[in-house]
Amino acid sequence: MPVNAIALTWPPSAIHGWGVFGTNLLREALRRGDVKPITLFPMQAEYMNAADRERFQGLIAEQQQIEKQLAGAQGDITLGGVHVLHSLGNDLAEPPEAARFRGEPNVGFTFFENMVFAQDVVARNAHFQIMMAGSTWNAEILQEIGFPRVGCVFQGVDTDAFKPAPKTGWFGDRFVVFSGGKLELRKGQDLVVAAFKRFHERHPDALLVTVWLNPWPAIMQDLAASPHVSTLPDVNTPFPNCINDWVRDQGVPEGAHIDLSPTFNADMPALLQECDAALFPNRCEGGTNLVAMEAMAAGLPCVLSANSGHLDLTGSDLSENDRCYPLSRQSPVPFGPTGSEHWRESDIDEIVAALEAIYQDRSAAKSIGDAAHAFMRGWSWRNQIDRLLSELDRLTP
């Protein structure tokens, strides 16, 4: 059944994965003209660039009108003829304010990293006629636990913006290692710091550049479980100071690291073009790691943990990989939270060796970065949103 209208139950923005996904879905729907986009909650306009604020003026006005019309409404609200997309997290949960909206059909879109599911998880989510997953790994799990209609669509990349470009000299002649993603145990920034500290001892010209803003600072406290760090970020100190202070507390020298949070998505291409490598030793990704995808599209040689959603980037057969430096030594994480039995720990020695390989053989690293760029060209937001709409067409009862 063709998709005529699609509604979002989360706010688009430019600073985290869900927000960027929503923003690009709206952009593509407007570009296509054959699918009406609807946003059911206020946009985070302060976290959007000027072009998007202008582009979405009509949608913002419509959302405000919807909000007025629904003021005081009780119970569930059904949007006839609209595919309503719901963002689902661990245990396929969603905020109650979003759950009241029902589509025809109702679509659950999920990226989950925690494997603790309630026994009634399928029955509790029977109001979703379609479940969509952001990685092959997530999709296979949804099928295993019994959901009847499961689709899989990866996130996309703005391939017009994220592409190889010459350095402008922002960081001089430093060897720049980039790491991005909100700061938390799951994303492995403690491994980044531990590995970079060793690498910097060998190569004092190395510079670690991070964008680790976490919109939910309390989550950073789960780093207390890590054996690789001695202190925690101060949640009472604003970004980026709390990150810069924390990295220095781990023994990385002054001048060897800088965090540039917040950096809007539209400004990321200019930052990535100044870097020589990117590092993502994530312990688990329910999706395909948007920041890693953008780094690959920009032509950076990327060091990626070979687990969970990252396997859609590395490929399952690592022996045939020519588009990144996969971290193949993956072991269980004994200190993770409940439900993290499937998380995997990357080996710090292997991380350092991968950075060393990039540092020592820039020509080979460029070839890998070029292959990454070529691979990601097929993952443009235009292609991925087209695939999403095709999957919804296929799965709509």
Image (cartoon, rainbow, N blue to C red):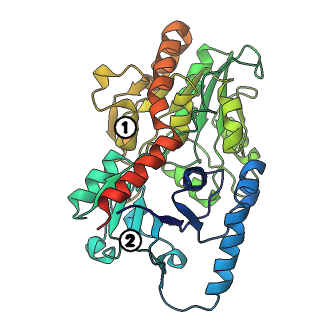
The mark nearer the N terminus, 2 or 1, is 2
Numbered mark located on residue 292 in the image: none
Q: Is residue 84 above or below residue 72?
A: above
Picture residue at 37% right of the left edge, 66% below the top? 91
Q: Is residue 93 above or below residue 282?
A: below
- Please name which of the two marks, 2 or 1, marks the residue nearer to the observer: 2
Which residue corresponds to mark 1?
A: 312
Residue 315 occupies quadrant: top left
How many numbered discs, if any? Answer: 2
Front-most of 356 and 380?
380
Query: What is the x, y in percent for residue 207?
Result: 68, 24
Element at label 1: helix
Q: Mark 2 is on which residue type?
A: Pro
Query: What is the x, y in percent for residue 220?
Result: 59, 53
Element at label 2: loop
Q: Is residue 286 visible?
A: no
Picture residue at 47% right of the left edge, 49% below the top? 385
Left or right: residue 174 compared with residue 129? right
Front-most of 225 and 364?
364
- Distance, label 2 to label 1, CA atoms, is 28 Å
Q: Is residue 93 visible?
A: yes
Left or right: residue 41 compared with residue 340? right
**Quick check: marks 2 and 1 in contact, CB under 8 Å?**
no
Picture residue at 51% right of the left edge, 73% below the top? 95
Q: Mark 1 is on which residue type?
A: Asp
> Dot 1: within a 10 Å radius of its alpha carbon, few (fewer than 14), some, or many (20 or more) residues?
some
Residue at the farthest front position: 34
Which of the image's four quarters has the C terminus?
bottom left
Query: What is the x, y in percent for residue 257?
Result: 70, 30
Which residue corresponds to mark 2?
A: 105
Front-most of 132 and 390?
390
Residue 8 occupies quadrant: bottom right
